[in-house]
Image: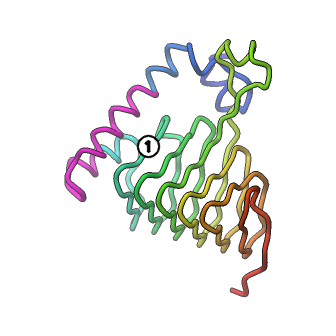
Amino acid sequence: MTEKEKMLKGEWHDANFDASLLQERQKAETLCFDFNMSKPGSTEQLSALRELLGVDLPQGLTVLAPVYFDYGGYTHFGEGVFVNHGCYFMDGGTIHIGKNVFIGPFCGFYTASHPMNYKERNEGLERALPIHIGDNCWFGANVSVLQGVTIGSGCVIAAGSVVTEDLPENCLAAGVPASVKKYIKQ
């Protein structure tokens, strides 16, 4: 099995030294640079985003520069998503974002982790687990979502929160780590 296949299956893989993964990340970094340095809303900017994501852009998707992706093609946006300035998508594990999700500035979605043992960590090992975000969610500024987390539809995540565990639908979550503060009547 290739390192990429291991990565996409959520298994430990060599993310730091595998030539194929390094090449994919370099391509994504170049496309992020092209997107971030283009005039907002220009043909060049949209072309870079389209190539980065590897798909036709969903209707109503708005992504403001700067934005950063490890790979790009493993992040999937629904229609009507808004991504504010300075967001980061560490998408070695897939990131699925539902429809009409508002993502505040400087949010990060982190699918990867490294071994606790430094010898294994120094070998370049990493494991990436997917993140799933339901429809109609709102992320305040500076929210971090960690690997393997599922957030139900209709959630509001307060600014500065760190989401380490799954959250049910229609809740307000806040804190480090984030916890349910109340349920929202939708």
Type of colouring: rainbow
Q: Is residue 116 left or right of residue 54?
A: right
Q: Magenta segment, which residues? A: 25-47
Q: Given the current orientation, which residue lies at the most extreme bottom position?
A: 185
Q: Where residue 26 sits in the image (x, y, percent)?
A: 40, 26
The secondary structure making up most of the magenta span is helix
Kindly identify the residue that appears in the image at 41 percent across and 48 percent down.
Answer: 67
In the rendered image, which quarter contains the N terminus? top right
Image vertical order of residue 140 relative to residue 31, above or below: below
Other-residue count near label 1 (Cα within 10 Å), few / some / many at <14 / 14–19 / ≥20:
many
Foreground residue among 9 and 93: 93
Is residue 35 rendered to the left or right of residue 90? left
Q: Quadrant of residue 154?
A: bottom right
Residue 80 image position (x, y, % from top left): 45, 69
Lateral position of residue 80 relative to residue 48, left or right = right
- Amino acid carrying label 1: it is Tyr
* Residue 151, quarter of picture: bottom right
- How far across and down, in percent of the image, does residue 24 sit? 45, 26
Task: Give left or right: position of 21 versus 174.
Answer: left
* Residue that mark 1 sits on: 68
Residue 120 pos. (x, y %): 75, 15
**In the image, is residue 26 part of the stretch drawn in magenta?**
yes
- Assign the C terminus to one quadrant of the image: bottom right
- Secondary structure under tag 1 reads strand
Q: How many marks?
A: 1
Q: What residue is rendered at 33% in x and 37% in y?
A: 31
Q: Residue at x 74, y 74 (%)?
A: 171
Q: Is residue 99 magenta?
A: no
